[in-house]
Image: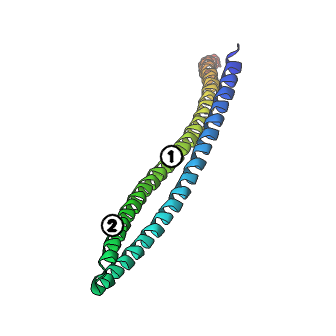
Amino acid sequence: MKPLTTMAMGAVILALGYGAADAQNGRTIKQDRQDVRQDRRDLNHDNRDIRQDRRDLAGDRRELSRDEKAGRTGQVKQDRADIRSDKRDLRADARDRRDDRRDLNRDRRDLRNDQDVKRDRQDVRQDRRDLGRDNRDIRQDRRELAGDRRDLRQDVQDRNADRRDLRQDRRDLASDERSR
């Protein structure tokens, strides 16, 4: 294969490879964005649950206080069991919130990294285009330099010929002046 054809085929294969990689990266970024949105929804849901658990706990404590003042021992035991249950629910929801925050932060980091990868790939493509342009400029400069060297050699030869002509003309002039 001719070098130019080989280079063109290589460029096509490279472009197709980057196109596929960009499509995959685009899907990854889209998925990371969806994960971030879902993690935010989960976090909001966990916060609502925690607020509700705290309200339930406060209500159970008020009931416990009333039942203790009224001397209802059966109800006091039930209120204490309800308080323990509410505390367990509160701890579980707090754990869920912590886990969802961790997931949200991880997904945000993944999204940033995927966007960095996409930018880096774009930078690499731009650098390759710049490099190709620079290589074309260098080849053009070399062609111009070769032409300038040829012109310089021709100018040196012309100058040498002009010097010879000048010396010959001076000799002819001196000879003519003597013969006069």
- Examine the image and state in which quarter residue 12 appears: top right
Q: Which residue is mark 1?
A: 116
Q: Nearer the viewer, residue 148 or 37?
A: 37
- Examine the image and state in which quarter residue 92 appears: bottom left
Quadrant of image for the C terminus? top right
Question: Residue 150: x, y in percent?
Answer: 63, 21
Q: Is the residue under label 1 in contact with that under label 2 (CB below 8 Å)?
A: no
Q: Residue at x 60, y 26 (%)?
A: 142
Circle number at residue 84:
2
Question: Residue 97: x, y in percent?
Answer: 42, 60
Q: Residue at x 38, y 68 (%)?
A: 86
Question: Residue 158: x, y in percent?
Answer: 64, 21
Q: Residues within 10 Å of mark 1 (few under 14, many from 20)?
A: few
Task: Establish if 77 lies above or below 136.
Answer: below
Q: Residue at x 50, y 60 (%)?
A: 42
Labels 2, 1: front one: 2
Scheme of image coloration = rainbow
Query: Under tag 2, what secondary structure?
Result: helix
Task: Establish if 115 lies above or below 90.
Answer: above
